[in-house]
Amino acid sequence: MTNTPRVKPLFYTGILITGLFFSAVPAAIAQSPFKGLENLFTVPDNYVIHHVDTPPVIDGDINDAVWQKAAWTAEFQDIEGDLKPKPYLKTQVKMLWDDSCLYIAAKLQEPNLWAYQTHHDDIVYYDNDFEIFINPNNTTHQYFEIEVNAINTLFDLFLNKPYNVSGNPMVSWDAAGMRSAVKVQGTVNNASDTDKGWTVEMAIPFRSISTGWNTRPPKDSTLWRINFSRVEWDTKAINGKYVKDKDSNGNNKPEHNWVWSPQGLIAMHMPERWGYLLFTKGDNNVTFTMPYAEQQKRYLWLIYYREKEWFRQHGEYTLSLDKFGLTDKVTVNDQANTLQLEATKHQFMGLITDDKDKITWTINQEGLIQPINYRSHE
């Protein structure tokens, strides 16, 4: 099987969304640098994941006693957030971890259970599915995607960077040692009845979602980026089979995209918009606090989105912050920071430096986020 059917729709989605960001850029900049981009700067959701000594049994039954230690997420929302109606079916997730694996449980309300993709690495989102997106290093590059349908057909892939900056999916990558199970509350591919839903259970080894030499598990207070998506198609029963609803031209109607943490656009491959996953070995009183560095990065993403639109309009990047309504001085959480912008026609780097601690974070034209004045030896 080639990966062409998978790549094309996602890649072109990534290109076309650029025009949606900035339909009124000049007026927006005159008022506020963030004006017009509010949907891309809502605060992502967060989840505090607790460590366990006894892992769940991966059989699709998520009623194990150990799962009672984990809280359910809020119900999924539309991928565009408040711009669209609330999903008409409920979806929730919970997570746990031990020294070897990330454990995920999901429950999906579904009155019509069906699944026709049967081979590993089939294009599972052609069915109704549940999807996981994981970026352990929080750079927006080198991330993982895992999809599953109601008969436990898996599609897993690794991306070196997002599609909208010419990322290449590695479909040949498999999450080595991953275990998954699905349990249905109803019957699959039987259009004559009404079902209740399905549950998913996964154990994902940390070593299988690691890059380079660092295959060690997370530690207490480690922070990852993660999101979950549910693809849901509108269907009708024809001759006993579920068939996707068609539009007036005879094409499939667009699928619904429901997610844990809204992306702000119909585009899952924007890792900067994913939720935060905080690992803890502490008690249930541990809470999430937005790291200062993540607050700084908001300005880097503002530069990134504005530069992309500038390039679309002018065919080159600019090195002038004032083109975006920005000065070189900004305040982050009551602390003074300095912004810098370096650019050639075809490349740019935005920098933000805390004036007190002198820690600098950068972003480039591929959306790669990195610190430049220290190296992690963990």
Image: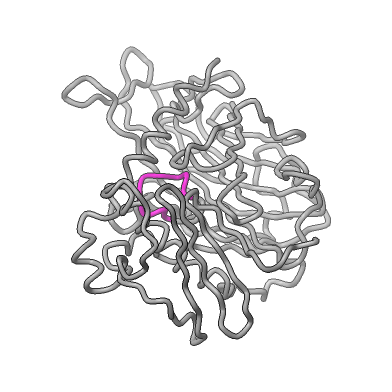
Q: Which sits in the foreground, 106 or 126?
A: 126
Q: Where is residue 374 in the image (x, y as percent from the top left)?
A: 71, 67
Q: Residue at the spot x=55%, y=51% of the render?
A: 140
Q: Where is residue 139 in the image (x, y as percent from the top left)?
A: 59, 54
Relative vertical location of residue 8 with respect to residue 273 in this rendering, above or below? above
Q: Residue at the spot x=59%, y=62% of the render?
A: 47
Relative vertical location of residue 376 with respect to residue 14 in this rendering, above or below? below
Q: Is residue 305 magenta?
A: no
Q: Is the magenta stretch mostly helix, strand or loop?
A: loop
Which color scheme is applied? Answer: one colour
Seen from this angle, which residue lies furthest left?
248
Q: In which quarter of the image is residue 126?
A: top left
Q: Which sits in the foreground, 133 or 351?
A: 351
Is 323 on the left or on the right of 132, as rendered? left
Q: Which sits in the foreground, 294 or 200?
A: 294
Q: Is residue 263 magenta?
A: yes
Q: Where is residue 253 in the image (x, y as percent from the top left)?
A: 27, 30
Q: Quadrant of the C terminus?
A: bottom right
Q: How many marks?
A: 0
Seen from this angle, which residue lies furthest top?
239
Is 226 on the left or on the right of 249, as rendered? right
Q: Position of residue 353 (x, y in %)?
A: 55, 75
Q: What stretch is highlighted in magenta?
A: 262-270
Q: Residue at the spot x=39%, y=41% of the render?
A: 14
Relative vertical location of residue 66 with respect to residue 234 in this rendering, above or below? below
Q: In which quarter of the image is the N terminus?
A: top right
Q: In which quarter of the image is residue 232?
A: top left
Seen from this angle, which residue lies furthest front?
344
Q: Residue at the spot x=60%, y=85% of the render?
A: 356
